[in-house]
Amino acid sequence: METNIFSFQIGKFQMTAISDGCFHVTKDFFFSNTPDSIISHIPDEFNAPLNFLYINTDDKKILVDAGFGEGHKPISGQLLLHLKSKGISPEEIDLVVITHGHMDHIGGVSFEGKPTFKNADHVIRKEEWDYWSERSQSEEFKRLETLKNHLTLIKSNKEIAPGIGLIHTPGHTPGHLSLSIVSEGETLLVASDILNDPAALQHLPSHINVENIPREGLLTRKRFLQDAVDKGALVFACHYPFPGLGHVRSEKGTWKWSPVTL
Ligand SMILES: [Zn+2]
């Protein structure tokens, strides 16, 4: 069974969950502010999944984040390879959504100073751009800066195609974006990094140690999960086990994850 690419449909949109590989993390890093009792089964160090999303609307080919990129092969940086195996070349991508500026999401946007997806517009929230531009010496900003002639900064929630909306979900970073994808009565909500691991749904203050504004992240998580339950939406989470897809349920004051199994 293929464990790098998973194709599915949301209404009329063709969707593909694509693995970029994984990245090595410590338990302390991945589960900040988390009671030991809910993560006792998790080893002190492990490889966290990296799942990203490709959307074909017929009109537009959209990529949601670009993975770690060339410098991080072979453990990650596999996204392009997997896209190509589906017959999709980087030149075909019309739009890249940057959910936030962490390297596991933006490393792949450029290579040797040039945009990887050279015909694509790249969309990022203005707060995110401002945050990284205030850190102009960071590797993240140097990577984002290579896109400056291919970048649209957005200041409010916006549809990038009919049925595909970008939603400001701050907390993990100031300009973090989630997506709401609706077609023919079906809904997919893209969490990106406001969710870290299914185990942490038992304790929503749990977050990845790079979460910028944890108090805001917690509010965002609660809102996102409630929205997913209310809409009966399928959820896509970047760092959940591949393909990162499932439904959330609210049960006795806590949340549970029902994964889509391959
Ligand atoms: Zn991430």
Image (cartoon, rainbow, N blue to C red):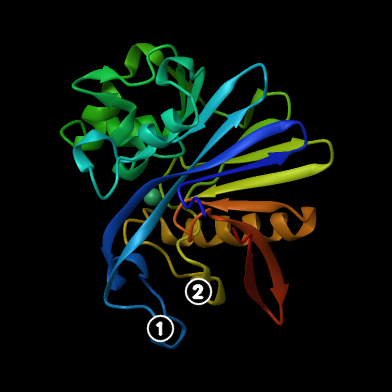
SS at mark 2? helix
Q: What residue type is labelled 1?
A: His
Res 41 label:
1
Foreground residue, 20 or 88? 88
SS at mark 1? loop
- For residue 128, above or below residue 227: above
Most extreme residue toward the right is 185
- For residue 89, above or below residue 177: above
Task: Locate residue 260, reporting x and y percent.
Answer: 63, 59
Ligand 1 within 8 Å, label 2 CB: no
Most extreme residue toward the front is 1
Question: What residue lies at 53% left-to-right and 53% top-to-bottom?
Answer: 243
Please name which of the two marks, 1 or 2, marks the residue nearer to the observer.
1
Task: Locate residue 242, reporting x and y percent.
Answer: 49, 56
Question: What residue lies at 42% left-to-right and 43% top-to-bottom?
Answer: 174
- For residue 2, above or below residue 66: below
Residue 184 is left or right of residue 246, and the answer is: right
Question: What residue lies at 42% left-to-right and 36% top-to-bottom?
Answer: 82
CA neighbours of label 2 inside 10 A, class few (<14), some (14 to 19), many (20+): many
CA neighbours of label 1 inside 10 A, class few (<14), some (14 to 19), many (20+): few
* Earlier residue among tags 1 and 2: 1
Quadrant of the rendered image containing residue 110: top left
Foreground residue, 12 or 2? 2
Q: Which amino acid does label 2 sit on?
A: Ala
- For residue 193, above or below residue 253: above
Q: Are marks 1 and 2 in contact (CB under 8 Å)?
A: yes
Does residue 167 show up? no
Res 199 label:
2
Residue 176 is left or right of residue 228, and the answer is: left
Quadrant of the rendering where the C terminus is positioned: bottom right
